[in-house]
Image: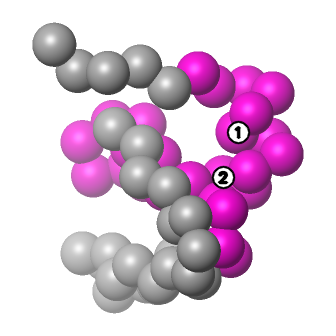
Amino acid sequence: MCISAEQAPISVELPSGGVLVGQAGDWLVQYAPGDVGVVGSGVFSKTYRVVEEP
């Protein structure tokens, strides 16, 4: 799962108590259940591709 922070910075509280912060244009990526990270737009565009769920 990926979510784009298209026009505003994002801040996501984690169940562990930590906080992820991203800038406008960054992506929130779920690598596995409970494992998420913020990926910069430049890295995202070179590493990932957006697909639609069926």
The amino acid type, in three-letter code, at marker 2 is: Val
18 in the magenta segment: no
| Cβ–Cβ under 8 Å for marks 2 and 1 | yes
The magenta span reads: 23-49
Residue 41: x and y, percent? 74, 51
**Looking at the image, which residue sits at the far left?**
54
Q: Return the residue at label 1.
A: 44
The amino acid type, in three-letter code, at marker 1 is: Phe
Q: Is residue 18 left or right of residue 16?
A: right
Between 26 and 12, the one lying in front of the other is: 26
- Name the image quarter holding residue 14: bottom left
Which residue is at a point 27% across and 52% down the rendered structure image? Answer: 34
Instruction: Bin the neighbour count of mark 2 within 10 Å (Cα to Cα): few under 14, some 14-19, many 20 and up.
Output: many
Q: Which mark is drawn over residue 36?
A: none
- 43 shown above or below 6: above
User: Which SS class for mark 2?
Assistant: strand
Q: Return the residue at label 2.
A: 39
Which residue is at a point 57% across and 81% down the rendered structure image? Answer: 8
Say whether disc 2 or disc 1 marks the residue closer to the N-terminus.
2
Q: By what rule are the colours in the image chosen?
A: one colour
Q: Is residue 14 left or right of residue 15?
A: right
Which residue is at a point 59% across and 74% down the rendered structure image? Answer: 7
